[in-house]
Amino acid sequence: MSVEIAERLSSLATKIEQQRASIETEEATKNAFVMPFISLVLGYDVFDPNEVVPEFTADVGTKKGEKVDYAIVKDGDVQLLIECKHIGAPLNIKHASQLFRYFAVANARIAVLTNGDEYQFFTDLDAPNKMDEKPFLVITISDLDQSLIPELRKLTKEAFDLDSIISAAEELKFVGELKRVLAAQFATPDTEWVKFLTARVYEGAFTQRVREQFTGLVEKAMKQFLNDRVNDRLKAALGGQAILADDQSVSSSEASEHVAEASVENVSEKDGIETTLEELEGYQIVRAIACSEVAPSRIAHRDTKSYFGILLDDNNRRPLARLWFNTAQKYIGLFDEQKNETRHPIEALEEIYQFADQIRATVHFYE
């Protein structure tokens, strides 16, 4: 399941990269990025008001009619509250005033603040029924920390376990904060950090001259250390082939680009067939819809020169949908009980959600 989430997050990251510049409003951010995250990644049906409630309202004291962008409902109870900002907008605690007010009233234990790329997850570790001021989990889709995917999986519809989430939240919160402190030190080591490391290798007094000398040495050593670790990982991934020069320092984003290039064969030409990221994203949308009826592992895809096929049980006799994305006008092909295909023109991938009922009905034709 974590692998599936990783694929969906990668597809969403590509979408963010391609469309970020054209998204101008908060509403457009929700439609383009947040709704696909709720559906594709978390696995909730954004068109089922019993699962996802947009513009959720709960009067709080003298505050009447205020709304939170989305409430996620599971087992009849509100479990997550989501407040959205415009893509690229910086997120801080000032943007979470409505989440604070709604947190106790709605009896939710998880609150999410997002700009469509960065997601900050909050709970009530510091005081019961009062939302913490610091998130216990921060995920940036366009620069994803792969180690956090298992934690994100706990928030999905399929695996949602509130006790597990809360028990892991405190550790995640402090580990996340420590990682951010370390990242800051690796970028620009401060005097205390330099002094701490210098004391491990130098026995003399920490004078001004020593501080100036070791500030440069510490910064250089940390960059080389990061480079060595990244190089070791890449060697292991590529069967021992070195990618980076020993004296080359890299950022985490540059390392991710190298890994992505090494994995690009997953979306490459084969026998004249080129599987595009857009086709894979469309597949993930159809899969997210259909998995409310059958296990996700039963939904497969096969690409052809003409169309991208989505099948039940990887069986050509059980087509669920076809994506006709090889021309300027895109279509989604859907099937009736006699397996007759009807193509529907679409302009954007989000329009696939409009056919959710038909896709689910097609699943039942074969069951």
Image: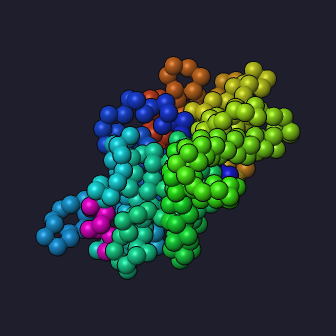
Asked whether 91 falls inside the magenta stretch, the response is no
Q: Nearer the viewer, residue 12 or 230?
A: 230
Q: Residue placed at 30% from the left, 38% from the top?
A: 25
Image quadrant holding the C terminus, namely bottom right
Q: Name the chief secondary structure element in magenta.
A: helix
Question: Can residue 98 be seen by looking at this rendering?
Answer: yes
Q: Residue placed at 86% from the left, 39% from the top?
A: 240
Res. 22 image quadrant: top left
Q: Which residues are magenta?
A: 97-104
Q: How many marks?
A: 0
In the shown orientation, is residue 127 left or right of residue 344? Answer: left
- 126 above or below 360? below
Q: Residue placed at 40% from the left, 29% from the top?
A: 21
Residue 184, percent from left and from top = 51, 49
Q: Nearer the viewer, residue 210 or 47?
A: 210
Residue 96, percent from left and from top = 31, 59
- 312 above or below 158? above
Residue 17, percent from left and from top = 50, 33
Question: Can residue 301 be seen by looking at this rendering?
Answer: no
